């Protein structure tokens, strides 16, 4: 049980490095374009662009993590082809748990570890998405003075 736990711990660290790197690179890029005074970043197309970039980067990070786990599974000779290993990894990562393909008893702890990582990474992704969307929404929210003026016109 110690070897699967140690290999799983290494895979967890690799997953975290993948997602954290993707998030940091994406946020640095977004901060640069949002703060660019030459950008017309007040329109709906800009907001759609920002949210699309966030979703694409986060999802790409998830796919890279699934691929890393699938590579580990295949290196351990759990699956005969990468496609099956990737499918099994995706089922684990999303905590879907079909059970149609199972790992050997020796390595099955890795599936549970991958599911734990998947839950954490989806939570991180949701938090990042909310953190990016809040300022976008706030830019379009009326100020207190605008609300008062609107109420006075009624």
Image: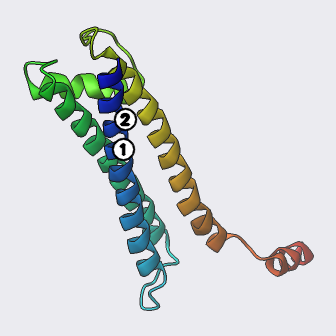
Above or below for 93 versus 63: above
Quarter-wise, where is residue 90 in the image?
top left
Q: Secondary structure at mark 1?
A: helix
Residue 94 visible to the viewer? no
**Rendering coords of residue 144 (x, y %):** 83, 76
Where residue 7 sits in the image (x, y, percent)?
Answer: 29, 31
Q: Which is nearer the eye, 33 or 13?
A: 13
Number of numbered discs? 2
Residue placed under numbered mark 1 in the picture: 13
Residue 29 visible in the current orientation: yes
Quadrant the C terminus occupies: bottom right
- 113 over 151 or under it: above or below: above
Q: Position of residue 116 (x, y in %)?
A: 45, 30
Residue beneath the point at 27% across and 12% down: 106
Q: Which residue is mark 2?
A: 9
Foreground residue, 77 or 87?
77
- Tell me which residue sits at (35%, 59%) in the image: 21
């Amino acid at each position: 049980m110690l070897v699967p736990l140690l290999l799983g711990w290494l895979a967890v660290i690799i997953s975290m490095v993948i997602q954290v790197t993707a998030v940091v690179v994406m946020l640095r890029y977004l901060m640069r374009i949002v703060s660019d005074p030459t950008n017309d970043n007040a329109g709906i197309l800009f907001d759609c662009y920002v949210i699309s970039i966030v979703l694409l980067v986060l999802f790409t990070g998830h796919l890279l993590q699934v691929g890393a786990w699938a590579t580990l599974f295949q290196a351990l000779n759990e699956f005969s082809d990468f496609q099956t290993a990737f499918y099994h990894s995706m089922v684990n990562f999303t905590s879907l748990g079909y059970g149609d393909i199972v790992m050997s008893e020796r390595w099955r702890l890795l599936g549970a570890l991958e599911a734990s990582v998947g839950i954490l990474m989806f939570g991180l992704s949701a938090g990042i998405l909310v953190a990016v969307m809040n300022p976008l929404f706030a830019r379009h929210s009326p100020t207190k003075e605008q609300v008062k003026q609107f109420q006075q016109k009624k």
